[in-house]
């Protein structure tokens, strides 16, 4: 068994980290499409093409389950992908449902990419699970740039975060949803700017549990687990920022031309 994980870049490593925590004995093959990042401002057809190409590559590499660790790619491609492949495909969507269940003020802020917010699937999510709740969306493309650069804290990150969340807090949101897998890497700084009564929702742990439930049979015992991380962008840059993104996790890395 091998879990194939994909994202537009390094954001999905926030999901890899949760999957590895829960399934330390299971090999993981990750592809970060940093050469095409961000997906957030791309057309759905383009996102689809990339997701199919990367999925083929992961399957050729032996993946037995595909985790789309990208909300934008899930919103546009999970349906077509499930129609095209027989292996289990796990996607992730902004945590609108848990947010609607948690809010006391009746106002929820969803931080997500433009591509996610524009998707039909996102509108269905809001209509089905957040009736009677005011859902304010906010794209944060700067967060993706910061995380891709490996800038997880400091004045630049603080400024970008404050600019994005202040309007949501001013609108009385008491729950913020991290609707893009890059954003959890900024959680410590985001949390430091939130009043105590405002909560932050990240679906990384929930999707890792979903992956665990879908793996068949006995899970391999913990031991030497192979974590292989490929990038379509600069390998040198990936190697430089990886210790910040995945402290304590050893991975083999490579460039991949797709
Ligand atoms: N990490 C991605 C997501 O969860 C997309 C970020 C981007 O490439 O714009 O939506």
Image (cartoon, rainbow, N blue to C red):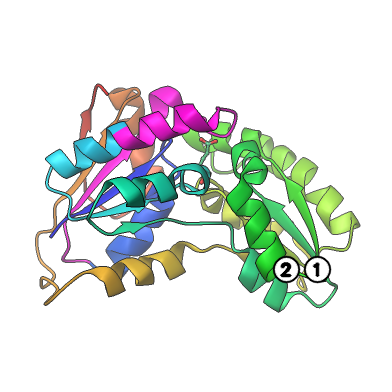
Disc number at residue 130? 2
At which x and y percent is residue 108?
76, 63
- Image point 89% across, 57% down: which residue? 171
**Splitting the image into 4 quarters, where does residue 30 fall?**
top left
Magenta residue span: 24-52
Residue that numbered label 1 is attached to: 133
The residue positioned farthest toward the front in the image shown: 83
- Image point 12% across, 47% down: which residue? 62
Task: Decide if ligand 1 comes within 8 Å of the CB at mark 1.
Answer: no
In the rendered view, tell whether residue 3 sits above or below residue 244: below
Disc number at residue 59? none
At which x and y percent is residue 168?
82, 54
- Image point 34% across, 40% down: which residue? 242
Q: Secondary structure at mark 1?
A: loop
Position of the C terminus by quadrant: top left
**Splitting the image into 4 quarters, where does residue 200 fall?**
bottom right
């Amino acid at each position: 068994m091998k879990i194939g994980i994909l994202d537009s870049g390094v954001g999905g490593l926030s999901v890899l980290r949760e999957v590895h925590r829960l399934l330390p004995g299971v090999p993981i093959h990750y592809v970060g499409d940093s050469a095409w990042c961000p997906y957030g401002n791309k057309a759905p057809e383009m996102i689809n093409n990339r997701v199919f190409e990367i999925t083929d590559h992961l399957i050729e590499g032996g993946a037995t389950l595909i985790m789309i660790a990208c909300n934008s790619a899930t919103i546009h491609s999970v349906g077509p992908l499930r129609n095209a492949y027989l292996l289990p495909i796990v996607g992730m969507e902004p945590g609108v449902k848990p947010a609607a269940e948690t809010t006391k003020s009746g106002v929820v802020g969803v931080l997500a990419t433009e591509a996610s917010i524009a998707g039909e699937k996102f509108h269905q999510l809001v209509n089905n699970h957040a009736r009677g709740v005011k859902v304010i969306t906010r794209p944060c493309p700067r967060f993706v740039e910061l995380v891709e650069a490996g800038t997880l804290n400091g004045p630049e990150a603080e400024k970008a975060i404050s600019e994005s969340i202040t309007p949501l807090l001013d609108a009385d949101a008491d729950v913020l949803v991290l609707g893009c897998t890059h954003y959890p890497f900024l959680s410590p700084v985001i949390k430091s700017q939130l009043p105590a009564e405002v909560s932050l929702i990240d679906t990384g742990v929930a999707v890792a549990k979903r992956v665990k439930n879908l793996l068949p049979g006995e899970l391999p015992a913990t031991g030497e687990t192979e974590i292989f991380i490929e990038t379509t962008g600069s390998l040198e840059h990936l190697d430089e920022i990886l210790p910040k993104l995945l402290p304590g996790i050893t991975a083999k890395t490579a460039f991949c031309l797709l």
